[in-house]
Image: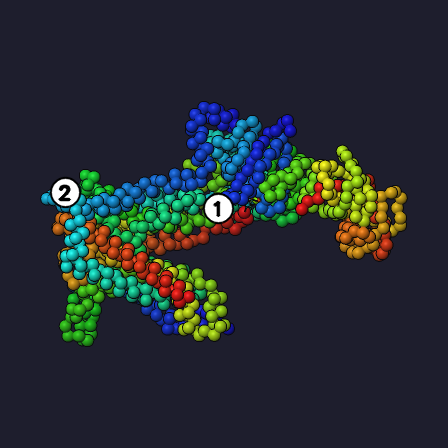
């Protein structure tokens, strides 16, 4: 019996590895050239230098942009995760008529082009007499992040042993305290993963920040502005490499937390009802 | 404890008690109450802005940041009749279609490989293939500018190897550069849904097909491919819609030849200073895309229903 | 019941068109060990959860100690529950689990520690304070759940098959402990089980449930000796059923014409005096087998079909002329020689006491 997948398929394996290379190699050019001792981004490489990294340290506008990005990303991650917790809890815990279209609506920003979401938000902000600032950027980022937060947390809350919360209510805690004393601690890996994910998305996001930001830029917008000056390209590469490294690290951590089996699963096994 | 309970019961107005009773009885009510903060926020930052955009698209831009709010269809007339926009619409759709096609085509075998041939480290593969997706979109696109540029990695590499005598100009600033870049950038959106649909296929179906005399190729086209169609459809939709409105990629690697509709939208909201027209362009592109996607889904469903 | 402590009044719970609990009226006395017994899916858990407040009755009202619970959320009810899955919080250790419900009482640390120590001592888990739930055995988890509920000093303790996940030996041990504990704390226990033996050994009273309704509420002895229906008689212990016709009968006793047995006196089950179609029910151990004809009037000849030796007792299957189904008989093996003689004998005698046969309304 030649069961499917039991035979080795070498060409397919080679192709898969090549595809992985296709995903990673282009991105690797950024760090490669960031250590190149030349302001031209071209082969052959001239020599090894860390000057582009060193020059970042005293760069006031860059550090200001970094600060902005971190503040926006923290706020975004916090708000989105909180909203994600409410929404994910609601749809996984209660039987609600019409919850499917509602979930669909919340997930909509996943597919609508960011430029449309961004300009629509821009229109309303300006019509309401608002001014663009890091706050408006944060609003835009929350819009993009809530679907991700909700997706991550929904998978966490599904299979959540309902009797844990009932036990808490039974022992005299109201919904609010049950939420903080049982639900949140038990969902902590998911919450952390959602927070890290939203942080990274916001930290890397460009379009919303571009449309909804003021003259006080976030890091991606700062980088975008630098692209106009060819002589600053190596600096951008160094900065980009740092951002990539941090993103990879944070996301890997989030993935690890998200997929790690936890006590939640273990207690589910004991549950009979 | 009961005395406390009865005390509160006695103190509570009947209405409050009725409300509490209703809340206890209705799961749906409690659910929507918990959902309401999120819904309110999404209403404020998504639904109302969208409505605002629709309204604005029927207005006329005046000097400064003011609008004439008399109803007009002129913006839509412009969007659909001016050559420039027609070209941009067609080009954007073309680029997105090609991107969708290539992304799915390239990703399918990998998803297939992971679903059927990888035994122990499936998750590692999946994480590896989705990890780049989470990193800066701007940087991933920018990487291709470095690779494809006039003095970029490919040209300078080939030059220093002596394989070409002068840099190739066909690499950057054209629609194919946009397609290549987008194919790379949206890979995860193809791999995941296809992988999921393949993973769901009951392995015994494949054995049944073999048992009934199908070779590996026939089995693939008669069983695996049709069953993974939902994944393909999902992937196509997930890639096609957002890429039509992509701004970063055409801006960085498209050049004037590769400009897409989003560049025109951005222009109207910035230097062009005609927001209503920008809104009309944005909404038109969404409507066109929605119509295309719906047609696509319906047609594919019909076709497979007939084959099945 | 004059002294109704928990009073279920017309409780119905419908899931869509399906009634999981159907118009239940029950009174439970203060300090009683009350069991809900019934096959899987008969609505025991649903009923218990309505007392705890996790489900809202579609109709009816739960009254505890004179207070209607209809607008009282679970966290304000004077009840505590031991969950079927125990629901030990995995992110807290044993002491924190047990102390969980004390937050609202605003006790100082020493008091909390004291109460926790007391509660753990009560369930014999002293020294386990810092363990996590995944470091506990099933029986230990069950004790933690018990301590966690008892520390609240509830008026009512609800237990949903708390022994279901334990092995037989531990189970029997815990049955005894639970019963002793209930006596010493004097809390009203409402105990759910589908194990009839468990219900009989532990309870003051048992409600046998079927399809969302209690079909008999009685003490274990009455339930066993005086079942009020074929269903209860069949569910509790073993029972032989014989078709019969009523001859006469009023009040407690009567007379029937039973297949194979002829004209025999019966004890009337609760509702049968008015019912025309009856069956006679008799427990296997109320029939005795004899090699020689015994004295007394209530006897009949029978033939041995099958025997099963169980050590302390034996099970026999005997056939009687005129009776379609064979009868099960069980006897203590006090005299092994007599037992062997019975097993070998082809033609035997069967006898019974005048109150051994119960007349029940035939169902179906
Ligand atoms: N939330 C629900 N929605 C629909 N039906 C339900 C729900 N909860 C319980 N039921 C149904 O109600 C009936 C009674 O369920 P319940 O859990 O009370 O049974 P049980 O007597 O506790 O059984 P077991 O001994 O198996 O625990 C079952 O048929 C069950 O399928
Ligand atoms: Mg149950």
Q: With A253 as the anchor, is C42 left or right in this view?
A: right
- Residue drawn at (56%, 36%), measured in percent from left and top? C11
- Residue B68 tag number: 2
Tell me if residue A21 comes above or below residue A80 in the rendering. below
On whether ligand 1 comes within 8 Å of the CB at mark 2, the answer is: no
The quadrant in which the C terminus of chain B is found is: bottom left
Q: Where does residue A98 sit, x and y in percent of width and height? A: 39, 45
Tell me if residue A128 comes above or below residue A34 in the rendering. above
* Residue at which label 1 appears: A161
Look at the image and tell me whether residue C178 can be seen. no
Q: Nearer the viewer, residue B216 or B73?
A: B73
Can you name the residue that lies furthest to the bottom here? Answer: B163
Q: Nearer the viewer, residue A203 or C316?
A: C316
Q: With B216 as the anchor, is B299 left or right in this view?
A: left
Q: Where does residue B39 sit, x and y in percent of width and height? A: 33, 42
Q: Nearer the viewer, residue C298 or B190?
A: C298
How far is the residue under mark 1 from the one under mark 2?
57 Å
């Amino acid at each position: 019996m030649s069961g499917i997948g039991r035979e080795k398929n070498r060409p397919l394996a080679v192709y898969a590895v090549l595809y992985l290379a296709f995903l990673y190699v282009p991105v690797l050019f950024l760090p490669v050239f960031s250590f190149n001792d030349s302001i031209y981004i071209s082969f052959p490489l001239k020599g090894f230098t860390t000057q582009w990294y060193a020059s970042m340290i005293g760069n006031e506008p860059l550090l200001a942009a970094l600060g902005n990005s971190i503040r926006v990303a923290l706020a975004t991650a916090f708000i989105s995760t909180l909203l994600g917790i409410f929404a994910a809890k609601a749809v996984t815990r209660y039987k609600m008529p019409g919850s499917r279209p509602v979930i669909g609506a919340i997930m909509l920003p996943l597919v609508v082009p960011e430029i449309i979401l961004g300009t629509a938000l821009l229109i309303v902000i300006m019509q309401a007499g608002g001014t663009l600032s890091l706050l408006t950027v944060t609003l835009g980022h929350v819009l993009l992040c809530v679907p991700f937060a909700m997706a991550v947390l929904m998978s966490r809350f599904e299979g959540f042993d309902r009797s844990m919360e009932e036990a808490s209510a039974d022992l005299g805690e109201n919904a609010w305290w049950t939420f903080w004393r049982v639900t949140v601690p038990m969902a902590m890996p998911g919450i952390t993963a959602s927070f890290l994910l939203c942080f990274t998305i916001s930290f890397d996001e460009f379009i919303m920040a571009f449309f909804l930001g003021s003259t006080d830029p976030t890091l991606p917008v700062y980088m975008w502005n630098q692209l106009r000056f060819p002589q600053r390209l190596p600096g951008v590469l160094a900065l980009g490499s740092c951002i990539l490294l941090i993103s990879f690290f944070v996301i890997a951590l989030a993935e690890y937390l998200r997929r790690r089996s936890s006590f939640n699963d273990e207690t589910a096994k004991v549950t009979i009802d | 404890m009961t005395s406390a309970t009865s005390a509160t019961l006695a103190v509570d107005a009947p209405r409050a008690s009725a409300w509490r009773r209703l809340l206890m009885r209705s799961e749906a009510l409690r659910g929507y109450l918990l959902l309401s903060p999120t819904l309110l926020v999404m209403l404020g930052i998504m639904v109302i802005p969208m409505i605002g955009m629709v309204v604005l698209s029927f207005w006329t831009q005046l000097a400064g940041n003011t609008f004439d709010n008399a109803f007009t269809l002129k913006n839509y007339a412009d969007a659909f009749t001016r050559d420039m926009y027609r070209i941009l619409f067609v080009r954007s759709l073309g680029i997105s279609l090609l991107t969708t096609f290539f992304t799915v085509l390239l990703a399918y075998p990998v998803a297939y490989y992971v679903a059927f041939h990888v035994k122990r480290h499936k998750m590692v593969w999946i994480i590896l293939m989705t990890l780049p997706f989470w990193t800066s979109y701007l940087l991933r696109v920018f990487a291709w500018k470095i690779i494809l540029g006039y003095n970029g990695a490919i040209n300078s590499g080939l030059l220093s190897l002596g394989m070409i005598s002068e840099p190739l100009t066909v690499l950057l600033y054209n629609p194919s550069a946009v397609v290549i870049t987008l194919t790379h950038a949206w890979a995860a959106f193809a791999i995941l849904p296809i992988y999921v649909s393949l993973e769901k296929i009951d392995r015994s179906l494949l054995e049944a097909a073999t048992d009934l005399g199908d070779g590996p190729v026939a089995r693939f086209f008669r069983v695996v491919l049709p069953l993974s169609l939902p994944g393909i459809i999902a992937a196509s939709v997930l890639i096609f819609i957002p890429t039509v409105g992509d701004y970063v990629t055409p801006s960085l690697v498209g050049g004037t030849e590769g400009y897409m509709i989003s560049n025109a939208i951005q222009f109207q909201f910035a230097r062009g200073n005609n927001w209503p027209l920008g809104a009309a362009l944005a909404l038109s592109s969404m409507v066109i895309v929605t119509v295309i996607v719906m047609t696509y889904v319906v047609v594919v469903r019909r076709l497979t229903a007939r084959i099945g | 019941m004059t002294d109704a402590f928990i009073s279920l009044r017309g409780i119905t719970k419908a899931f869509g068109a399906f009634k999981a609990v159907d118009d239940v009226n029950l009174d439970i006395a203060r300090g009683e060990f009350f069991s809900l017994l019934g096959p899987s899916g008969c609505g025991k858990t649903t009923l218990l959860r309505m007392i705890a407040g996790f489900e809202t009755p579609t109709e009816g009202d739960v009254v505890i100690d004179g207070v209607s619970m209809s607008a009282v959320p679970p966290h304000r009810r004077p009840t505590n529950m031991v969950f079927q899955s125990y629901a030990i919080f995995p992110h807290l250790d044993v002491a924190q689990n047990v102390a969980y419900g004390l937050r609202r009482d605003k006790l100082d640390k020493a008091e909390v520690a004291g109460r926790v120590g007391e509660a753990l001592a009560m369930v014999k888990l002293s020294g386990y304070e810092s363990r996590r739930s995944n470091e506990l055995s099933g029986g230990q988890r069950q004790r933690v759940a018990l301590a966690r509920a008892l520390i609240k000093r509830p008026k009512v303790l609800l237990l949903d098959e708390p022994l279901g996940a334990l092995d037989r030996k531990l189970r029997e041990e815990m049955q005894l402990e639970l019963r002793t504990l209930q006596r010493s704390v004097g809390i009203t226990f409402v105990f759910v089980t589908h194990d009839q033996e468990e219900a009989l050994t532990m309870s003051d009273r048992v409600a046998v449930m079927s399809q969302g309704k209690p079909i008999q509420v009685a003490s274990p002895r009455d339930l066993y000796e005086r079942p009020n229906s074929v269903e209860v008689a069949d569910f509790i212990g073993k029972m032989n059923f014989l078709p019969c016709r009523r001859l006469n009968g009023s009040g407690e006793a009567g007379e029937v014409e039973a297949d194979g047995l002829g004209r025999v006196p019966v004890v009337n089950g609760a509702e049968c005096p008015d019912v025309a179609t009856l069956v006679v029910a008799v427990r296997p151990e109320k029939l005795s087998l004899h090699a020689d004809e015994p004295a007394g009037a209530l006897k009949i000849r029978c033939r041995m079909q099958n025997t099963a030796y169980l050590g302390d007792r034996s099970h026999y299957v005997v056939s009687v002329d005129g009776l379609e189904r064979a009868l099960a008989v069980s006897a203590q093996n006090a005299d092994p020689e007599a037992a062997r003689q019975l097993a070998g004998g082809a033609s035997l005698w069967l006898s019974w006491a005048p109150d051994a046969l119960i007349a029940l309304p035939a169902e179906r």
